Amino acid sequence: MSRPTAHGPARSSDGDGDGGVDDTVRALLLLMPRMVGRVKKIPVPEALQSLALAPRHLSLLAYLLLDGPMTVNELAARLEVAPTTVSLLVGDLSRKGILERREDEADRRRRIIGIAADQQPAITSWLAPGAAAWRKALAPLTPDQRKLFVDTLLAYEAAVESEGQD
């Protein structure tokens, strides 16, 4: 029987304790639900509870929190969605008072999107701890290892999606 260790993937008791793919899958099958459960337990700040924010809103807010105000096209590129999708999200969050749009001083035709000043503390208290945890977990890794980690999560996401379409 395999058991996860504090320092790595599960080790098989059948002599195949070399950290093979199946051992790592077992460890991840235990770890992923715990991670999701912990994320779901992060309380939404009271100021934001009535706003019915969806995961797609969180990614947009996280980029604005970490990188500051930007244009719809910049957000679309980072979120890997169409600018029209971002425009809809921004419109929704602007109506709720979470985001504000201002004119770009360099090009008055463009709008810069940012978190509304009165919402900044609530959003920071909500999303910043997760970013700090990722920084702590990823800091010891080399840039190549961090890229491999993200690429592996993307491959997992794609595999789960393709399994669901069969």
Image (tube, grey):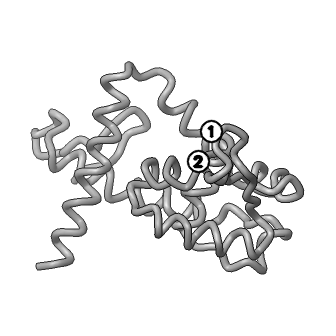
Q: Which mark is residue 63?
A: 2
Q: Which mark is residue 114?
A: none
Other residues around mark 1 within 10 Å, as few (<14) / some (14–19) / many (≥20): few
Q: Can you name the residue that lies furthest to the front here? A: 108
Question: How many other residues sit within 10 Å of disc 2, few (<14), some (14-19) or many (≥20)?
Answer: some
Q: Position of residue 125 (x, y in %)?
A: 78, 51
- Report the side of 34 relative to 90 (left or right): left
Q: Nearer the viewer, residue 48 or 137?
A: 48
Please indicate, yes or no, whether residue 129 appears anywhere in the rendered image.
no
Residue 7 left/right relative to 123: left
User: How far across and how far down the image is residue 16, in percent?
Assistant: 10, 40
**Residue 79 location in percent, x, y?**
45, 54
SS of the residue at dot 1? helix
In the rendered structure, are the residues bearing label 2 and label 1 in contact, judged by CB atoms less than 8 Å apart? Answer: yes
The residue located at (64%, 48%) in the rendering is 64
Q: Quadrant of the C terminus?
A: bottom left
Closer-to-camera residue (150/114): 114
Identify the residue under disc 1: 67
Residue 120: x percent and y percent? 81, 52
Locate residue 14 relative to residue 142 in the image: left or right: left
The kind of residue on which mark 1 rests is: Asp
Name which residue lies at 74% across and 66% down: 44
Q: Secondary structure at mark 2?
A: helix
